[in-house]
Amino acid sequence: MSFTDCCIKGFEWEGTPTGTEGKLGDNDTYITGTNPDVAVLLIHDLYGWKFPNVRLLADHWAREANVTVYVPDFFGGEAVDLGHVEANRWDLLRPFIARNAREIREPEIFACARVLRPKYKKVGAAGYCFGGWACFRLAAREHDPPLVDCISVGHPSLLTKDDVDGVAGAAVPIQVLAPEKDPVFSPEMKLHTFQKLQELGAPL
């Protein structure tokens, strides 16, 4: 599977998002669900927080799992040029990616989790592609107490061995959805993730 097949040849789901737009800390945020005790911080992929699919997914989780889901904007009000994405023009996308590098967005992501932490009894985080590395960082043992109670990631991009090595072990359960063929989450990273999480005692 090529990167284009995995991340670009997607489709837009049918339906109309039912949540509302508000704030989570300083970030504009899509909010859906009404559970006062359990929240999920859903970290979007390259398509951003306004892409209908991510909002419809948030709505589905809110209904099916009875959680309140927050989808903050972690691209600073900017949206990726979908035409460039669909044309696989990464040369034109590099400036956008640089403006939203993990080193830039990580403090915002931590800040949003810190707003949720005292408000809810349980806080989970989920992320696909761009959101994957961020969830691992939220699960890092450097946070005391933990910022989240569990994470779920799919096809994590920009993930490093240090991110995996730094998780809080048994304190934060981790779910990793890894396609058999993934140009971003390489076989080497999959193996390291699987072995290291077992070594750290992380519930899988």
Image (tube, rainbow, N blue to C red):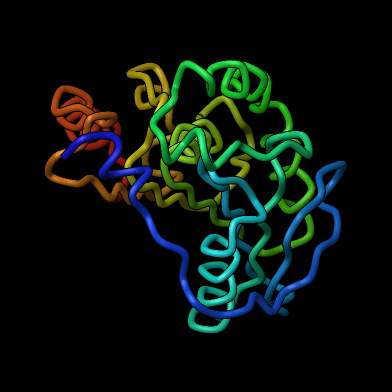
Q: Is residue 89 left or right of residue 204?
A: right
x 61%, y 46%: residue: 48
Q: Position of residue 170 (x, y in %)?
A: 37, 43
**Considering only vertical position in the picture, is 57 above or below 144?**
below
Q: Residue at x 71, y 45 (%)?
A: 73
Tell me the residue at 57%/47% (across/down).
Answer: 43
Task: Between residue 182 and residue 13, name the one nearer to us.
Answer: 13
Query: 167 or 107, which is in the foreground?
Result: 107
Tell me where residue 143 appears, x and y as whole percent: 61, 31
Q: Is residue 192 above or below residue 132?
A: above
Choose top left, top right, bottom left or bottom right for residue 35.
bottom right
Q: Is residue 107 left or right of residue 171?
A: right
Residue 167 vs 117, above or below: the answer is above
Q: How many marks?
A: 0
Could you tell me which residue is drawn at 69 percent across and 72 percent down? 32
x then y, percent, for residue 195: 17, 30
* Quarter assignment of residue 81: top right
* Quadrant holding the N terminus: top left
- Residue nearest the observer in this picture, 184 or 66: 184
Q: Horizontally, is 35 left or right of 129 in the view?
A: right
Q: Answer with left or right where residue 158 lies relative to residue 41.
A: left
Please state the horizontal and vertical placement of residue 26, each as a whole percent of the image. Answer: 87, 41
Residue 120 drawn above or below residue 191: below
